[in-house]
Image (cartoon, rainbow, N blue to C red):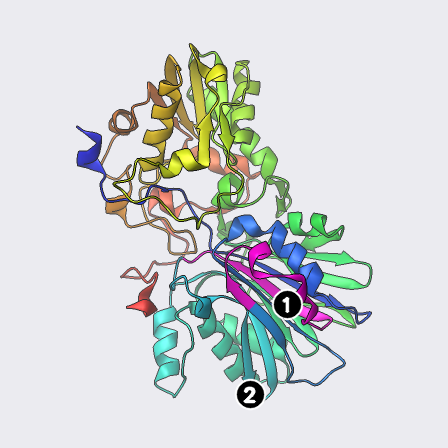
Amino acid sequence: MKYNDVISHEQPDSGLHEECGVFGMYDFDGKDVASSIYYGLFALQHRGQESCGIAVCDTEGPKGKVDSFKGMGLVNEVFTHENLAKLHGNLGVGHVRYSTAGASTRENAQPLVLNYVKGTLALAHNGNLINANELRNDLAYTGAIFQTTIDSEVIAYHIARERLKTKSVQEAVLEACQKIKGAYSLVVASPRKLIGARDPFGFKPLVIGKRDNAYIITSETCALETLDAEFVRDVEPGEVVTITADGIASDRTMCLQAKEQARCIFEYIYFARPDSHIDGISVYNSRILAGKFLAIDSPVDADLVVGVPESGNAAALGYAMQSNIPYGTAFIKNGYVGRTFIKPQQSSRESAVRIKLNVLKEAVAGKRVVMIDDSIVRGTTSDRIVNMLKEAGAKEVHVRISSPPFLWPCYFGTDIPEREQLIAYNRTVEEIRQIIQADSLGYLKVERLEELVGGLSICKGCFTGKYPLDPPKEDIRGEFDR
């Protein structure tokens, strides 16, 4: 079977993408938080590279005033000293975005700022709702006018509507969360409160931190480290936390039993930064373990173990530690290429993979190489990387993947496409090996996944087709753009 017969007309970059990173901060001493949110978003840049934004308010100032700025591009491209200096306020939220539902446009950049009868709301959301269409239609038929095509706006509208019937904004957030289904980690700034909410399954991470007299709610602990803030605790799946000058209040009425939770395993395998901890588990240690399990379950005689940067590196080190095969560097990554760079045309000789990665010929020439990567989605990238290693003189290339084969799409914020686009769909491991032209191919076993995270309950839907929530009957991703 020829490679071109199997996969055609695909984008050169076939890797996985996360949807977003969120960051909220409340400084009780009244200090401006915009610059701290900027650095927090900088630490979360890996979670989204299409757009970003910051919205702040002064808790001692007028209730309806929110300063915000957002745009397309990386954090350091969108924000300058000048526009950050105009963002005055001691309470605010920030967001970095990669789109899985809703087009990549400035209108869809977050945070969303809503002015309504009770004041203002600034909201940042990471995740994907599976009942967004239904909720959006209900709102539209009662007169709601939408400015975006993202499901985050549906959440913001529902919070605003519930606020008209409740005594506090945190009650409104709780009521809204009981209506939405799917994956969400939220940070919401109201005029005097910072609120965080995590869906009952805990798909996406959310943590609380503290620096001096300021509290932070954000996607990952690495953002706390960047700001020299201390980690307080994870927001529990299903929990709504409210931070005011009186401290942290918590509502756990939506929390499920531990065995019913369903964290996205790809936070540990790929999405999160390796220096982060999620629900008490080190992301770095999870990746080391994945590599060790691959070495135990899919051993091979070889001279060198290498990782495809960045997320394959720790798993490659784990493979080397377990197998006693030397660990080395085979790839040099261009650190200035984001996920949104202008891709070459299909007819162009410049390969998107080669623009991002180059092979160290001296490291691999004449050697049997074990190459560790985090996943194979469509197979287009894997094929090219294996070919690059062989062109550089590698005698053999043995590919090991630190996740199981993708067989089903994801509806909870990861852009795993429809089944027909997945290379593993209706193919054996041997057929995939032939397509990517590797000398051998091994995947992580599904049974190993819980071991990576110390027995925490996880979502394995993209591998097994068994989701913690009934998936929508149609693909809802990007629905509102049609």
| Residue appearing at x 73%, y 78% in the figure | 59
Which kind of residue does numbered mark 1 sit on?
Asn
Q: Is residue 243 visible?
A: no
The answer to whether 85 appears left or right of 443 in the picture is right
Sequence order check, earlier mark of 1 and 2: 1
Picture quadrant of residue 240? bottom right
CB within 8 Å, label 1 to label 2:
no
Query: Which quarter of the rendered picture does the C terminus lie within?
Result: bottom left
Q: For mark 1, does the 10 Å Cα neighbourhood hold few (<14), some (14 to 19), or many (20 or more) residues?
A: few
| Residue appearing at x 74%, y 62% in the figure | 215
Q: Position of residue 170 (x, y in %)?
A: 62, 75
**332 above or below 420?**
above
> How far is disc 1 from disc 2 in space, using C-alphas?
34 Å
Q: Position of residue 284 (x, y in %)?
A: 60, 36
The answer to whether 230 appears left or right of 368 in the picture is right
Q: Secondary structure at mark 2?
A: loop
Instruction: Determine which of the numbered discs, if any, sits on residue 476 in the image.
Output: none
Which residue bears the numbered disc 2? 164
**260 above or below 386?**
below
The answer to whether 200 appears left or right of 460 in the picture is right
Q: Is residue 85 magenta?
A: yes
Q: Is residue 479 visible?
A: yes
Picture quadrant of residue 119? bottom right
Residue stretch in magenta: 70-99
Q: For mark 2, does the 10 Å Cα neighbourhood hold few (<14), some (14 to 19), or many (20 or more) residues?
A: some
Query: Which quarter of the rendered picture does the N terminus lie within?
Result: top left
Which residue bears the numbered disc 1? 83
